[in-house]
Image (cartoon, coloured by chain):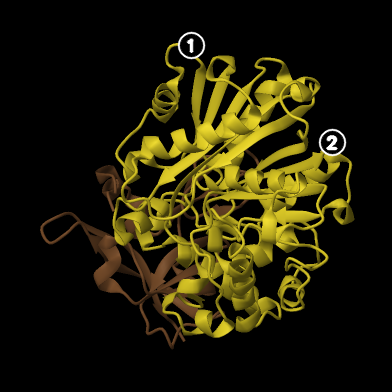
Amino acid sequence: MSVSRFWRKIPQRYNLIGTVCTTCGRHFYPPRSLCPDCRRGGKIIDHQFKGDGEVVTYTVIRTASDQFDSATPYVLAIVKLDEGPNLTAQIVCTPDEAHIGMRVKSVFRRIAADGESGVIHYGTKFVPAE
Amino acid sequence: MRDVAVIGVGCTEFGEHWSTSFRNLFVEAGALALEDAGVTGEQIDALYVGNMSAGRFVEQEHIGALIADYAGLASNHAASTRVEAACASGGLAFRQAVTAVASGMEDIVVAAGVEKMTDVGTGASVDTLAGAADREWEGFAGATFPGLYAMIANNYMHRYSLTREQLAQVAVKNHDNGVHNPIAQFRQRITIDTVLNSSLVADPLRLFDCSPITDGAAAVVVVPLERAREFTDSPVRVLASAQASDTIALHDRRDISTLDATVAAGRRAFAQAKLKHSDIDLVEVHDCFTIAEICAIEDLGFCAKGEAGKLTEEGVTALGGALPVNTSGGLKACGHPVGATGIKQIYEIVQQIRGEAGGRQVDANIGMAHNVGGTGATVVVHILGGC
């Protein structure tokens, strides 16, 4: 995967910093700079998420793109953060452990690498919190 | 706005075209469509070409011009435009052609779709297709396209009664239909056991729950309805053309296992055509994965949420059923050259309405085509009818 280099500079990716609309109170992760409800009437500021959440749905990826091929099988999920928003992330657990409704907490992990000598991508994964 | 009709259709065989170039694929489909329509190249005002990712699959951009050129239309300078909406590129190209003719801006327009996907390996094609979702926040985390639909399937199965066998029956049924389709990539029957014993791709989806990697092209010719009889005795009228959008990322949806853009586009199409569900004789839905067909039948409103699995099991959606779904074999058996699929759906509906569908022919006067881009961020729905 040819992830654009500038994405490594996005602080929100590493720290689970999203945004919140101070007009309506809706939280966003991934961060948004425009509230889809209030649109230009909303005021957006950064928000540090606690990192606790619940698995809404998941799968076990068995066939991946080249960059993730060596990591298969891995558990991928949509996690609902306690503050409201959903995000897509890997769960660090065995395929048998994963289930819908599972409580999870965020961790900072290596996500992938562009080959043996390429850029290493870091970001947020989740671990079971039960 | 003018009424619009399809006067000709053409399609290459779908499959692995190792010895054919990208440009030759669409030239073949285009020539078949023009021949069918009785139109010459000089008469064409404009082309709209659905293509998702020639830049990554064959490292060629500027597809609109390339197609016009190799279709022999460079000298008459026909307006040619590439249309991209991931796997809905073809359906959207058709909608652009319909819009151009309906507006009065153009008269004789070709809508085409083309994709050549087998020139790259599986990992590279998986990666390219992942670009139809949110690369920065889904693909980055390791999401693949089957993976996203697998998460829809798990969410769906957690909430509604859908058995693994019912899901497999979607693939079995579409392979049964594909047997009768000379352009289908797979023309052999499979059983539920074939699906359940195939390798896991992304749990719970197995290899035979997934549409394959495919090369192919399709083209149709549209004109104002009032001129259609100049060219053909069997024009097919466009009764509705609807499009809707939703969030690019699956995780931002209101409901993980409902494609709200399908709901919206379906409602708009029915309202435009002033038709009800019982008026529709057949539907081509976007079955990129078995779960996608289940969701499509429900989200288009043909049954309540949670009931499409039972409908499939009971044979309602089979060729002899009350609502034949994917008579062509769908994306599953025909193959899914992403940019071409939406046009192939129109090709199938037109063939059915004209009574030219051979062994898969159903009693058809009105048909619907449903084409999805990504996990539902773009949906295009058309209704066509005989006249």
In the rendered image, the vertical position of residue B290 relative to residue B373, given as above or below: below
Label located before the other in sequence (2 or 1): 1
Q: Quadrant of the N terminus of chain B?
A: top right
Q: Dot 2 lies on which element?
A: loop
Instruction: Please name the residue shown 34% across and 77% down the image.
Output: A73
Residue located beneath label 1 in the image = B76
Residue extending farthest to the left is A117
Chain bearing tag 2 is B
Is B183 left, or right, of B18 in this rendering?
A: right
The answer as to whether the residues below labels 2 and 1 share one chain is yes
Q: Residues within 10 Å of mark 2 (few under 14, many from 20)?
A: some
Is B369 left, or right, of B21 in this rendering?
A: right
Instruction: Please name the residue shown 61% across and 41% down the image.
Output: B91
Which is more toward the observer, A58 or B228? Answer: B228
Amino acid carrying label 1: it is Asn
Q: Is residue B157 visible?
A: yes
Residue B387 shows which numbered tag? 2
